[in-house]
Each structure stands twice: as structure tokens, then as C-alpha cells.
């Protein structure tokens, strides 16, 4: 009986050891979608940290830039280690890139065989360009990852464009200092008219854009009911790198309520830009203006 008790105790101890061994096994790395193989994921995590590689996880993959730079968001998840519940906003090269849940998340750039850096450091070292940063941001535009930031570009780099009217036949681009109008009419080949126009209140547009949470808007922010009065009120506005589209917008009475509270900040700016252009001498001199 005594030997039997010893045998049971030994068996129980073995079971505990086996369980503990299972908990201490090294991480088995897995591929991240079709973007990174399991071997690459392991390299990414080890390049991010030799000490905590097993606790690094790929959170979001943004793509390959400059031919070899993989850009992604990584998450350091150490059991028992809590992180502050503060959303992290990432601004790089005067561009709002995205927001991540808390400080345990980071934006990284990784080059196979060379190592990993923060995306900001990679930009500063010339591994990615400003255009690359804008492309990274564009991949998550309109998603929950890019809804909480504000316009970061300085006034001297700020540009906007506005297309409006039926089939967006009228267009203005601030950085080119000109606008284009297309007459659909009955002609087989639409006629285009162009003139240069320096927008007189660029700073006013810029200040309004800075005050708006422009990144919280979906690309297609509004679609009203179609009627004759709304034919001229289709808008596609781009403020720096954020494009927002609204169709069948009713004429707005300043003393009335806006049709949608969520986008009311957009209506004044698009009507102001459109009216400034259409009241200009340059617009009125165009042979094709309506």
C-alpha cells in the first residue's frame, strides 16, 4: 500500500511537471495572412526585441514601401503587464497616420535581413518617403484605425480640391491655382474650359479644416434624396489627404437645421468654397460656366 501511495504521488508530480512544461514551451510563430510567412513573423518579432520577441504580435499590416520596407502595427502583449488605457495617435511627416488602442501598440518598419525600426525613425533615416507615409495612412482611411486625429499639415503645405455639380462637371484644385469645367450639353465630345484662379481665402479654409474632425468622416459621408434642387449640390472635397463625398445635398438655409448633424461641419465649407469660386470674375469669364 505504501509503495502504491508513492507511485500515485510520483504520477501526480509528473502530471504537474508536464503541465508546467506545456506552459513554458517556446512560441510557435504563425504566418500573418498572405503578407508574412511564419518565418518572417518570427524575424520581425525578434528584430523588434530580443528579450520580448515571444510577446510581440502583428496587429495590422500596411504593405511594402520603397520596394523592401514592410510597414505594420505591432502589439507587445506581456501576460500580467497592464497598459494605460490611452489611445496613441501617430503623426509622421505632418501626416496623421492612424490611432492605436494604447501604448503597447507601435508602428514599425521592417526590412528583412536588416532589422526593425519605429516608422518615425525609418522616415527620419530616409528608408520611407513622405509620399510613402501618406500611402500608409491611405490604406486605413475610413476605418476605425484612422478616425481620431486632426489635420497636421502646416498652412504652407495645405491644399484642397472641390468637385461639384451634376457628374462633378466643375472642379477646382488649389495647388494648381486653376479650375476646370466640362460642358456635357448635347455635344458628343464634352468641351472643357480652364482658367487660373488663386483662391482668396485659403487660410480661412485651412482654419476651418483644422477645427473639423475630418478623419472621422467616411469617404461617402452623405446621400440625400434626389430632386431637381439638389442637382448642383453633389460635392467631392479633398482636404490635404482626406477625400469626402456628399451627393444630393439640399440648399442650406442658415437659419434651418442641417439634414444630418454628424456632417454639419462639412456643409458650410463646401458651400463657401463653391460660392467663392462661382462669384469670381474668373468663373464668370468662362465661356462654359452655367
Image (cartoon, rainbow, N blue to C red):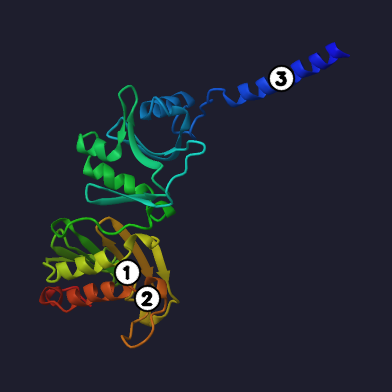
Q: Quadrant of the C terminus?
A: bottom left
Question: Which is more N-terminal, label 1 or label 2?
Answer: 1
- The residue that disc 2 covers is 249
| Residue located at (42% from left, 75% from top) | 260
Residue 47 visible somewhere in the drawing: yes
Q: Quadrant of residue 126?
A: top left
Give the CA separation, mark 2 to mark 1. 8 Å
Q: Residues within 10 Å of mark 3 (few under 14, many from 20)?
A: few
Q: Quadrant of residue 211?
A: bottom left
Q: Residues within 10 Å of mark 1 (few under 14, many from 20)?
A: many
- The residue that disc 3 covers is 13
| Residue located at (28% from left, 76% from top) | 268
Verify CB contact (< 8 Å) between mark 2 and mark 1.
yes
Instruction: Say which mark, if any, is on residue 100.
Output: none
Q: Quadrant of the N terminus?
A: top right
Verify CB contact (< 8 Å) between mark 3 and mark 1.
no
- The residue that disc 1 covers is 235
Amino acid at each position: 500500500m505504501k509503495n502504491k501511495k508513492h507511485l500515485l504521488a510520483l504520477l501526480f508530480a509528473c502530471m504537474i511537471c508536464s503541465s508546467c512544461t506545456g506552459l513554458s514551451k517556446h512560441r510557435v510563430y504563425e504566418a500573418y495572412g498572405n503578407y508574412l510567412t511564419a518565418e518572417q513573423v518570427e524575424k520581425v518579432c525578434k528584430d523588434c526585441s530580443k528579450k520580448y520577441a515571444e510577446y510581440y504580435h502583428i496587429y495590422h499590416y500596411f504593405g511594402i514601401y520603397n520596394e523592401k520596407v514592410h510597414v505594420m502595427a505591432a502589439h507587445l502583449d506581456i501576460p500580467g503587464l497592464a497598459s494605460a488605457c490611452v489611445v496613441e495617435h501617430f503623426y509622421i511627416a505632418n501626416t496623421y497616420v492612424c490611432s492605436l488602442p494604447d501604448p503597447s501598440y507601435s508602428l514599425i518598419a521592417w526590412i528583412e535581413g536588416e532589422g526593425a525600426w519605429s516608422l518615425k525613425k525609418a522616415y527620419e533615416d530616409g528608408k520611407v518617403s513622405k509620399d510613402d507615409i501618406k500611402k500608409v495612412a491611405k490604406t486605413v482611411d475610413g476605418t476605425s484605425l484612422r478616425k481620431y486625429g486632426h489635420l497636421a499639415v502646416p498652412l504652407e503645405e495645405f491644399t484642397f480640391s472641390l468637385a461639384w455639380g451634376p457628374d462633378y462637371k466643375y472642379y477646382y484644385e488649389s495647388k494648381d491655382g486653376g479650375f476646370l469645367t466640362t460642358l456635357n450639353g448635347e455635344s458628343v465630345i464634352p468641351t472643357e474650359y480652364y482658367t487660373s484662379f488663386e483662391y482668396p481665402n485659403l487660410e480661412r479654409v485651412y482654419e476651418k479644416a483644422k477645427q473639423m474632425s475630418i478623419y472621422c468622416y467616411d469617404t461617402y459621408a452623405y446621400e440625400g434624396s434626389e430632386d431637381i434642387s439638389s442637382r448642383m449640390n453633389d460635392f467631392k472635397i479633398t482636404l490635404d489627404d482626406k477625400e469626402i463625398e456628399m451627393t444630393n445635398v439640399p440648399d442650406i438655409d442658415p437659419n434651418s437645421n442641417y439634414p444630418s448633424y454628424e456632417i454639419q461641419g462639412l456643409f458650410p465649407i463646401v458651400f463657401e468654397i463653391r460660392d467663392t469660386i462661382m462669384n469670381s470674375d474668373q468663373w464668370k469669364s468662362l465661356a462654359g460656366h452655367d
